Each structure stands twice: as structure tokens, then as C-alpha cells.
Image (tube, rainbow, N blue to C red):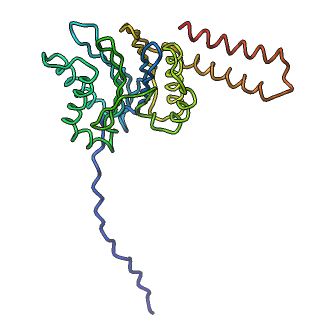
Amino acid sequence: MATDLLISPRKVYNPPSPRRPKDNRGKAVTIGIGIRCTDGIVLSADTLITVPGSHKYYESKIFAVSYPPLRDRSFFTFAGYPELMKTFRDKFTEAALRSDFDLSVSGVKDTTEDILQEMEGAILNSLDSTGGLQMLCASFIGGNLSLLRTSETSVHKVGLYDYVGAGDSSLLRYLSSLLLTQTVSVKIGSIIASYLVTKAKQLVDGCGGETDLVQIMADGKVHSFTGSFKDREILMAEFYIKQFIGTVFIPSISDDHRNKVFESLSTSFRDLLRS
């Protein structure tokens, strides 16, 4: 009696693909905003640092460098790899303390560029994993205000405004072009900067925490805030704006109701400006 032989196919051993080591370096996706105003400069950023596949923590992404013995100062905010930012900060602070440091706007620009070029290998190598390093620098030096932005190892002056990190998204390009069509006061600029940071925290993955904000005034005075304009207040103002726009395009709404909506909008912005 014939018997069918069931022959199992030979198993072919496929060695597992080598795993790439997990990148546990922190990343600051960030939304960093710099706005030149009629009476100063506003610098604002979120505070979330993300370690991919591990954890999140919060710290300020704005730091200051003072130039003794004067009250001249520079403020930096960044996106990318926090360790690169700390390396840059240490190198810049060391350079600023040297007797041959050129204490001028062009001196800050040249020194920043020199240090970034010295760090070029590390910045380029971390572009894919942690976003490299992008910075905004607002300075008050010798009675002059300046706003600079870095791009890898180069530095350029900012006109009306610029941003780093999540600001490369279409969200920030759209909102900033809508809100910053002309130079505004520091108070208004602070509200706009806080609004842009709030929207990024709301809609861009990797942005979060409280909002830090620094005002560098035309006379050199500096006002620093953490959570100066609360997210809920900013979003409530946005809600009233939407309500008001809605009343404009609905003819059936009474003048009395429209006036009440406008009054709510005015009160909301008045409260923000008092902050």
C-alpha cells in the first residue's frame, strides 16, 4: 500500500537585519519667534524637549549673554539638538569675555558665524536625527538693536520677523504673513508672538510646555516672562475674533448682538495688553 510522504520545505535561515542604535539624544522641535518692533524686539519660544522613544522634559530655550561691564546683552533661542546649543553657548560666552571681542552688532554676527563654522561637522551630522541647530539672536549693543538668524553655519540679519523650528511649517508661514504685515509695538508683537507659539503647541507635534517671552526695549531694558500670556487667554481672543468675523458675514444678526461680540473682542485684547 503506497504511502504519501509529506516532505516539509527546508527552512532557510535569514539573519536579522542589524538594528540601528536608538538615538536617545534630546530634540527641541521648538517654535522660536523673533519680531522687530517699533520700540524693541520680542523673542518667544516654547519649552518642550523630547528624547525620541524615551521621555520629555521642559526647560527654557532662551538664554542670555551679558557683555561686561556694560548692560549690553544678547538673547538666543534655538531649535534642534540641545547639546549643540550648550556647546555654542559655552564657546560664545568664552569669546565674549575675551579682551579682543568686538562688542558690536557685526562682532556678534562674525563671532556666531566663526563658532558655527568650527562646529560645522557636528551640526551637519545631526541634521537628520535631531535637526542640527537653528538659532535666533536678539541683541542690544551700544544703543543698537539687532535680530539675527542662523542657517547651519551662516548668519544673516532679520528684517521684520523670522522663526526657527516648527516655524518652517506652512502653519507658521501662513499665520505670520497674515499678522505681521507691518512693524508693530512690543506689546502687540508680544501678543502675536505668543499666539504663534500657542498655535504651534496646539497643532505641531513636538512643541509644548509654557511660553517663554523676552522683550528687549529700545533703551536696553529687558522684560522676561514665562507664560506671560496664557494659552487659554490667547485662544479665547482667537475665539472672539472668529465670532466677530462671523457676525460680519451674517446679515440676519442684529446690530445689538454684533456690538456685544465686538465688545467681547475689545475686552479680550484689552486684558491681554494689560498683562
Among the 4 quarters of the image, the one containing residue 154: top left
- Residue in front for this viewpoint, 110 or 238: 110
Name which residue lies at 49% across and 22% down: 193
Q: Say left or right for 267 vs 90.
A: right
Among the 4 quarters of the image, the one containing residue 236: top right
Among the 4 quarters of the image, the one containing residue 90: top left
Q: Residue furthest bottom?
A: 1
User: Number of labelled discs?
Assistant: 0
Q: Is residue 256 above or below residue 251?
A: above
> What is the quadrant of the N terminus in the image?
bottom left
Q: Residue furthest left?
A: 99
Name which residue lies at 25% across and 18% down: 104
Q: Say left or right for 260 vs 134.
A: right
> Residue 235's spot in the image, x, y percent?
60, 22
> Residue 96's spot in the image, x, y percent?
19, 18
- Residue in front for this viewpoint, 160 or 119: 160
Q: Say left or right for 116 vs 237.
A: left
Q: Is residue 20 above or below residue 126?
A: below
Q: Say left or right for 5 vs 92.
A: right
> Residue 215's spot in the image, x, y percent?
42, 13
